[in-house]
Image (spheres, rainbow, N blue to C red):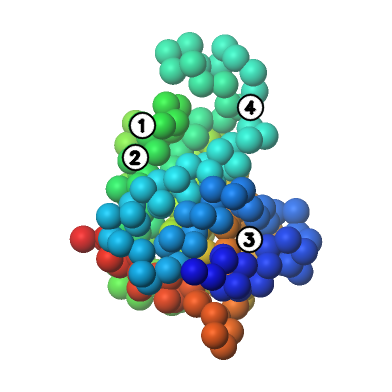
């Protein structure tokens, strides 16, 4: 089995990471989980546990510096400066997002869905979220397991910004290098957390190939 670093540019020292808004997840557990997801020989029953572990690490890192001390949430015991909202933009991701709500008690879970083509700036994106505070007061964690073209992620971010969100983090297992560069240029205030930057070069498993593997447990 190849190491995750063989599937794309090394995270450490990557040019895009010079931007302060890109955070690589290089914990050994993240590398192990990602390698299982990337390996086409991985049994189907191991995909979901690996995904849960990887998303947990992404969430821990995304909320690492958001603590505001104790006492801001007497019922939940939460100690974050802002309410945490996790939104998934894929069918596979929503199941994982709800699993995260069992681990992170302050977490609110919702989704962003699309009607029609997401390749342009005017895709019909819809927010599905109930009993939540205003997005302007929350830290919105947008989860897209695999970012290939970046179109869906971009459309979702635009929707969130139009809805008032000011603090957005994009969480993804793997992202294509060109998409990462494009998203960080267009959305300078958005933080991106990822465990793999894929350039899809010859002999390497691209983000699109990882996406096809993810389809095995979407049903």
In the foreground, 96 or 179: 96
Q: Secondary structure at mark 3?
A: loop
Using a 10 Å C-alpha cutoff, classify the residue at mark 2 as few (fewer than 14 neighbours), some (14 to 19) or many (20 or more): some
Using a 10 Å C-alpha cutoff, classify the residue at mark 4 as few (fewer than 14 neighbours), some (14 to 19) or many (20 or more): few
Q: Secondary structure at mark 4?
A: loop
Which callout, 3 or 2, points at the residue further toward the start of the chain?
2
- Return the residue at label 1: 102
Q: Secondary structure at mark 2?
A: helix
- Return the residue at label 3: 187
Residue 142 seen: no
Would residue 71 appear left or right of 130 to someone viewing this image?
right
Mark 2 to mark 4 CA distance (whole Å): 22 Å
Q: How many marks are shown on the rendered structure?
A: 4
Q: Is 97 located above or below residue 69 in the figure?
A: below
Mark 1 to mark 3 CA distance (whole Å): 30 Å
Q: Residue 208: horizontal and vertical position, in percent?
A: 44, 76
Would residue 99 appear left or right of 5 to someone viewing this image?
left
Which callout, 1 or 4, points at the residue further toward the start of the chain?
4
Q: Is 190 located above or below residue 74 in the figure?
A: below
- Return the residue at label 4: 67
Closer to the observer: label 1 or label 4? 1
- Return the residue at label 2: 99
């Amino acid at each position: 089995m190849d190491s995750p670093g063989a599937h794309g540019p090394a995270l450490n020292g990557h040019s895009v990471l010079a931007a302060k808004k890109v955070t690589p997840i290089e914990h050994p557990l993240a590398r192990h989980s990602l390698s299982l997801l990337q390996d086409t020989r991985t049994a189907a029953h191991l995909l979901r546990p690996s995904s849960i572990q990887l998303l947990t690490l992404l969430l821990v890192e995304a909320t690492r510096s958001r603590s505001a001390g104790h006492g801001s949430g007497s019922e939940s015991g939460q100690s974050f400066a802002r309410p945490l909202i996790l939104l998934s933009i894929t069918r596979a991701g929503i199941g994982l997002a709800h699993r995260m709500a069992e681990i992170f008690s302050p977490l609110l879970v919702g989704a962003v869905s699309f009607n029609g083509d997401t390749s342009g700036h005017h895709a019909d994106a819809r927010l599905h979220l109930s009993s939540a505070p205003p997005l302007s007061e929350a830290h919105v964690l947008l989860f897209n397991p695999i970012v290939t073209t970046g179109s869906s992620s971009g459309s979702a971010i635009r929707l969130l910004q139009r809805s008032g969100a000011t603090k957005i983090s994009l969480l993804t297992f793997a992202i294509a290098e060109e998409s990462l560069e494009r998203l960080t240029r267009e959305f300078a205030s958005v933080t991106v957390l990822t465990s793999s930057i894929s350039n899809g070069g010859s002999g390497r498993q691209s983000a699109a190939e990882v996406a096809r593997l993810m389809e095995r447990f979407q049903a």
